Image (cartoon, rainbow, N blue to C red):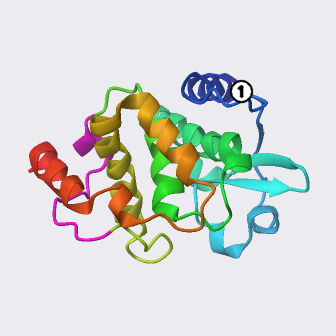
Amino acid sequence: MSAVVDESVDAVADILDIGWSRRVDVVIPATDSELVSLVGPAFADMAGVAIREGSGQRVVINRVRAAALTPLELRVLLRHEITHVATRDQTSDSAPLWLVEGFADWVAFHGLGLSLRQAAPLLTSDVTKLPTDFSGPGRDLAYQQAYSIMVYLESQLGEHGVVDFFLRQASKSAVDASTVGVAGWRDFLKSSIG
C-alpha cells in the first residue's frame, strides 16, 4: 500500500504546485466501529474519506470497500482523497460539491489514459444543471457529472486553467453556474459521448 500512496502523492503534486506538505497519513481501521468513529456514520459506506483532525489531516480507507477495488481503482481513490488533503486550506467548507468532488476526480484520473466514457460510464449528455445529489441515490452519477465538468473546462482552459479555476472558485460558498456554461458543457458531452 505504501508504494501506491507514494505514487499517488507524487501524481497529485505534479498537478498541484500549491505549497502543500506532500505528506499524507493513510489509516485503514481494523473494525467497522473504528471506521465509524473516524469518519462518522454518513461516510462509513465510502471506500475512502479525507478527514481533518485538529491541525492534521488524513485519508481513512474502508478496508472492506477497498479490498474489492482493482489496482487502478485504488490508485484513483487515493489520488482523489489526497487531492482533498492537498487543497483543504484553499477550499471553503461550503464550496459547491460539484467543484470540490469534480476537481478531485479530475486530478485522480489525470494521466491514466482513460476516456471520459471509461471514467464516467453512467454519464449522458442530457444535463440541464450542475449536479447537487452527492449523498443520495444519484451520488455516483453526480460524481461523474462533476468530473465531466472539469474535463469540459480542460477542453476550454487547458490543464493549468482548470487548476486556476478551481483555486479561484474553491474559497467561495457559491459559484455562479455561468462560470461553467451548462449549455457548453452539454454540447461537449454530446460530442464526447453521444
Mark 1 packing: few (<14 Cα in 10 Å), some, or many (20+)? few
Q: Is residue 175 left or right of residue 3?
A: left
Q: Is residue 84 left or right of residue 139?
A: right
Q: Residue at x 44, y 41 (%)?
A: 106
Query: 6 or 70: which is nearer to us?
Result: 6
The answer to which image quadrant residue 46 occupies is: bottom right
Q: Is residue 159 left or right of residue 39?
A: left
- Look at label 1 and name its amino acid: Ser
178 w.r.t. 71: above or below: below
> Which residue carries the number 1 mark?
2
Q: Residue at x 37, y 73 (%)?
A: 138
**Magenta span contains residue 118:** yes
- Please state the total of marks drawn on the protein image: 1
Q: Residue at x 59, y 67 (%)?
A: 173
Which portion, as a residue range, is magenta? 115-129
Q: Residue 13: x, y in percent?
A: 62, 26
The answer to which image quadrant residue 124 occupies is: bottom left
Q: Residue 110: x, y in percent?
A: 42, 31
Residue most toward the right? 54
133 w.r.t. 6: above or below: below
Q: Residue at x 68, y 48 (%)?
A: 90
Label 1: which secondary element: helix
Query: 174 or 142: which is nearer to us?
Result: 174
Q: Is residue 82 visible?
A: yes
Q: Give the quadrant of the N terminus.
A: top right
